[in-house]
Amino acid sequence: MSRGRRWLCATGCALAVGLLLGGIAGIAVGLVTAIAAERALRRVESPQTRQERARARGDLPFATDLLAAALRTGAPPDRAAIVVGEAVGGPVGTRLTLVGRALRLGASPRDAWAHLADLPGGRRLSRVAARSADRGTALTVALERQAADLRVAKTAAGEASARRVGVLVVLPLGVCFLPAFVLIGVVPVVAAVIRDVLSVL
């Protein structure tokens, strides 16, 4: 959401609160509401951003495996990153292409691999790749381990999302059945207890 649209929505919320409360209190609470609403709306991701993050989460383990395979065949890291980036496409492919170009232009491994840092799981991948390049350890082995870790994290995120959906599906049922349970199960018992207490008195 653009900044102008965020402030427009926040102003609408502030006006609604201000008119509801009225007076000086309404103005004060309305201002606080506008600032809080704008900050809350700033955190809301657009559908396109959510789709890109979901695609990146799915593509990154696969791209890391491809990168390790390309390095295993003897391709230099810059060439391997560009080839895999062009093959994978999407947000992961774009950033891998940037990594390859940065390495080709002589950037330090830390700066080059930092292009992946804003992807889900990319920050750790960029640190591992830069550290293995700095220390001279086998980048291929580090990438293979990281690909396995990313697959585990992707599976865990999918399971957590499935659990969250299960809770969200049950929540409306709880909202419907809880009042019915209170009216049918609790209220008659409480009424009977009160009747018995009053009859004793």
Image: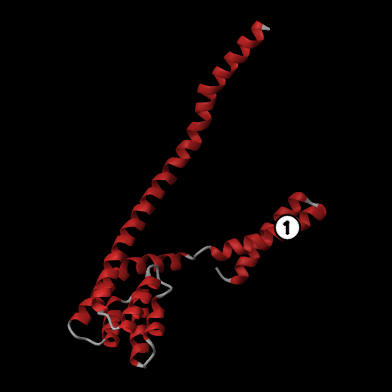
Seen as rendered, the residue at the extreme right is 23
Seen as rendered, the residue at the extreme bottom is 105
Dot 1 lies on which element?
helix
In the displayed structure image, the side of residue 82 where residue 180 appears, left or right: right
Tell me the crowding category of disc 1: few under 14, some 14 to 19, or many 20 or more residues within 10 angstroms, Cα based.
Answer: many
Which of 136/127 is in front? Answer: 136
Residue 148 occupies quadrant: bottom left
User: Mark 1 belongs to which amino acid?
Assistant: Gly
Q: Which image quarter is the N terminus in?
A: bottom right
Residue 117 occupies quadrant: bottom left
Query: How far across and how far down the image is residue 181, in percent?
Result: 50, 27
Residue at point 34%, 56% (across, down): 156
Which of 141/161 is in front? Answer: 141
Circle 1 is placed at which residue position?
30
In the displayed structure image, the side of residue 7 where residue 102 appears, left or right: left
Residue at point 60%, 68% (across, down): 5
Q: Which image quarter is the C terminus in?
A: top right
Which of 90/143 is in front? Answer: 143
Residue at point 31%, 58% (across, down): 155
Residue 76 occupies quadrant: bottom left
In the displayed structure image, the side of residue 78 where residue 119 appears, left or right: right
Query: How far across and how far down the image is residue 192, in percent?
Result: 57, 14
**With respect to residue 10, does 25 lie above or below?**
above
Seen as rendered, the residue at the extreme left is 73
**With respect to residue 136, does 179 lie above or below?**
above
